Image (spheres, rainbow, N blue to C red):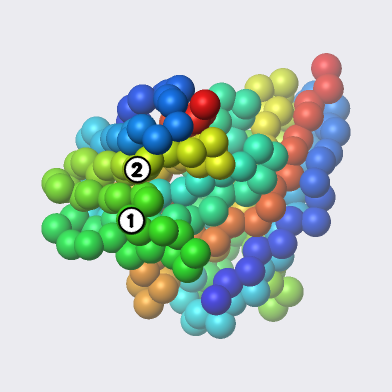
Amino acid sequence: GAVVSQHPSRVICKSGTSVKIECRSLDFQATTMFWYRQFPKKSLMLMATSNEGSKATYEQGVEKDKFLINHASLTLSTLTVTSAHPEDSSFYICSAQDPSGSPQDTQYFGPGTRLTVL
Amino acid sequence: AQKITQTQPGMFVQEKEAVTLDCTYDTSDQSYGLFWYKQPSSGEMIFLIYQGSYDEQNATEGRYSLNFQKARKSANLVISASQLGDSAMYFCAAGGSKAAGNKLTFGGGTRVLVKP
């Protein structure tokens, strides 16, 4: 149980285009999902908290207009990188909390998306 | 606010031996959780083990055990009988406080390389 998928796993795009990344909880309903960014050989940096049916909460320094988050259902959250530039190239990884799981607070992670902006 | 410190950037361990990964935390929350995740080169984050701040017994999960010393604010991970597949980055994290939005704060990670 507690499987989280992420799509696509890898994307290469031209500068100025927008890229959408999907995060799905496959066998549980997640009222809360999280989006992280990870630079090479670095730790995970929380970008935003995504709550189903409400606006995402962004961490300080994260541009909400740049990184659009939509949590339209209990099993799907999307991150759209708008007008991507080379500095947005990174590894993006989502996680979801299973409120009925044990331990309750555990975040289960998707496999990540490697974004390369040319 | 929470802060997680992993002082060992990298470690070598001989196959079949045990290894201890250090983690200290700083939190003002009364109730919190401590987590360890494994990140192999493929990038996925794999949940290993959890310790609640009010749990009196150290958590164990197969070959993983968590040495929880609350007074010292440490939550070291012990991997017993290391296997080649244990080579990965390991992250300690703290969180789970609903007051903090259930966010996790991660340490900088420790890279483990298991030698045959």
Q: Chain of mark 1?
A: A
The foreground one among A113 and B89 is A113
Question: Percent x, y for residue B72?
Answer: 73, 74
Amino acid found under the numbered disc labelled 1: Asp
Q: Residue at horizontal 83%, vertical 39%?
A: B11
- Where's the N terminus of chain B, which quadrant? bottom right
| Residue labelled with disc 1 | A65
Q: Which mark is residue B62?
A: none
SS type, badge 2: loop
Residue A102 shows in this picture = no
Q: Chain of mark 2?
A: A
Q: Residues within 10 Å of mark 1 (few under 14, many from 20)?
A: few
Instruction: Farthest residue to the top: give it.
Output: B116
Q: Spatial distance from mark 1 to mark 2, Cα to Cα?
A: 8 Å
Question: Percent x, y for residue A22?
Answer: 29, 35
Total label count? 2
In the shown orientation, is residue B46 left or right of residue A103? right
| Residue labelled with disc 2 | A82
State whether residue A47 is above or below residue A118.
below
Proximity of marks 1 and 2: CB atoms separated by less than 8 Å:
yes
Q: Residue at horizontal 18%, vertical 62%?
A: A54
In the shown orientation, is residue B116 left or right of residue A35? right
Q: Residue at horizontal 63%, vertical 69%?
A: B3
In the shown orientation, is residue A38 left or right of residue A27? right
The foreground one among A73 and A114 is A114
Residue A83 shows in this picture = yes
Q: Residue at horizontal 48%, vertical 38%?
A: A85
Question: Percent x, y for residue B19?
Answer: 78, 41
Q: Residues within 10 Å of mark 2 (few under 14, many from 20)?
A: some
State whether residue B107 is above or below residue A61.
above
Q: Earlier in the sequence, mark 1 or mark 2?
A: 1
State whether residue A18 is above or below residue A46.
above
